Image (tube, grey):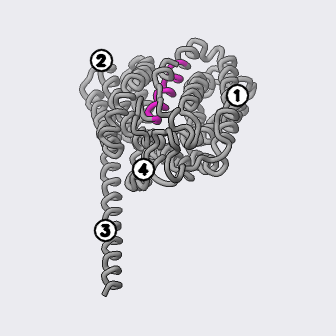
Amino acid sequence: MIVLNRVRLSTVNKTRPVGGPSLRPLLAMEALFMVGFSSVVPFLAAIAQDRYAFDASAVGLLIGARVAAQQGLFLLGGVLADRMGARLMVALGCLMRAAGLAAIALAAHPGVFVAGVIVVGMAAALFSPALEGLVGAADARWRRDSGRRGPAPFAALAMAGEAGAVTAACLAAPHMPGNAGVVALVAAGIFLAVGIGSLFLLPSSPIREPKGPAPEGTDVQPELTHSERHTPLVPVVLAGSVFLALYSQLFSLIPLGLAERGADAGLMGLVVVVWSLSTLALQWPLSRVAERAGRRRAVVAGLVLGMAGCLAAALGMAVIPDAALAAAVVPATVLLGASTMLGSVAARSLAASGGSARWRSTRLAAVPTAGGAAALLLSALTGAVARDHGLTAAWLIAAALPLVALTATAAVRVRGRARARGSEARRVLAEAKAAA
């Protein structure tokens, strides 16, 4: 948990009295979530094949069912968190995931195993939007603080989660799939402990924005600007969905490339390691760049980097020989990782602050929901293109998605500004008529 010690946000403690828990326990929860998650979920395919002899198509359906159960219910989880409070939803989600992991550990029948996998996905739709809503509240407080220190809260969340994922990978991989039952029971125990702890650490009711002047002795500044607080949600969700869609290509197109060239499948492990190390090394400095440049510019820069990552992969697949395939994989992974670190974090922060605190978790849940749909559609398209025209063409199709998002978000913003100018003109005209 080096990252948690490194992320020392003194502003969190200063702003805690005006609503919401301290950020530090939220980061600890995220790290533990990822320890429990990453010790089992990445190995589901291996467990299914080892225990029940699932073939490739059955494994694909299993993984797809988990993702659909998670992403499809995210928006509902966000609404429930806003209506019922984060504490209840985190506790219920943790208990549900513990039950799903216990089913995976103890299942004697493949049907029970599949049900456990689906429950594991559904659970995330309960606790993730709730936790992100609380981090969004911390992000709003951090932005009102004149003495900001450390990374932005959403950047800190990404670092904590990646630290947990790396820890889990190192601890669990040597025991998979042979001792999957024991590992899954340990993961279930982690989620059970976090669920119980959340009842004591998290607020019992939905968080509302403080009104009026800040309490004396805090560093809280006046409300965010109108532009920050009323950022249109549609372009934010549209742009934010692209980052998850591009991330999914690393785990669909690269394995296809390895299989096509007869390369060592262990290169996928290199992708995971490079992604994790890049996040731990670059997330903090890139978050500082994003804050200085502005969150909207950071989203644009993230989309440009995502396009560059896909073009790097396309070029690598076209010109790099099989023996040096890592030379194509590593640059693409780093660029796509930097894209997510800049753009995804900024998009989530904009979604968190772009409206009333009452619906913060709902807005945040809209981003991964749209991202899941975008990932599914893009993967289907690039898979078909890769089959018929090759991997270079598939990566070029993926590279076009950020360009489409940039064009669409620009069009939405231009239309919004035109509407605002029209409203202002009508208001001025009405005032002039009234004066006459």
Q: Identify the disc placed on residue 192.
A: 1
| Sequence-earlier tag: 2 or 4 | 4
**Of circles 1 and 2, which is in front?**
1
| Sequence-earlier tag: 2 or 3 | 2
Q: Identify the disc placed on residue 324.
A: 2
**Of circles 4 and 3, which is in front?**
4
Q: Secondary structure at mark 2?
A: helix
Could you tell me how far apart the alpha carbons at marks 2 and 4 are, in whole angstroms? 50 Å
**Residue 154 belongs to magenta span:** yes
Magenta segment's dominant SS is helix
Q: Secondary structure at mark 3?
A: helix
| Residue extent of the magenta highlight | 153-167
In the picture, measured across the screen, residue 250 lies left or right of residue 198, that is: left
Q: Residues within 10 Å of mark 1 (few under 14, many from 20)?
A: many
> Which residue does the image show at 47% across and 35% down from the upper left?
153
| Sequence-earlier tag: 1 or 3 | 1
Q: Amino acid at mark 2?
A: Ala
Task: Note whether residue 65 is visible.
Answer: no
Could you tell me how far apart the alpha carbons at marks 1 and 3 are, in whole angstroms? 53 Å
Viewer-nearest residue: 432 or 339: 432
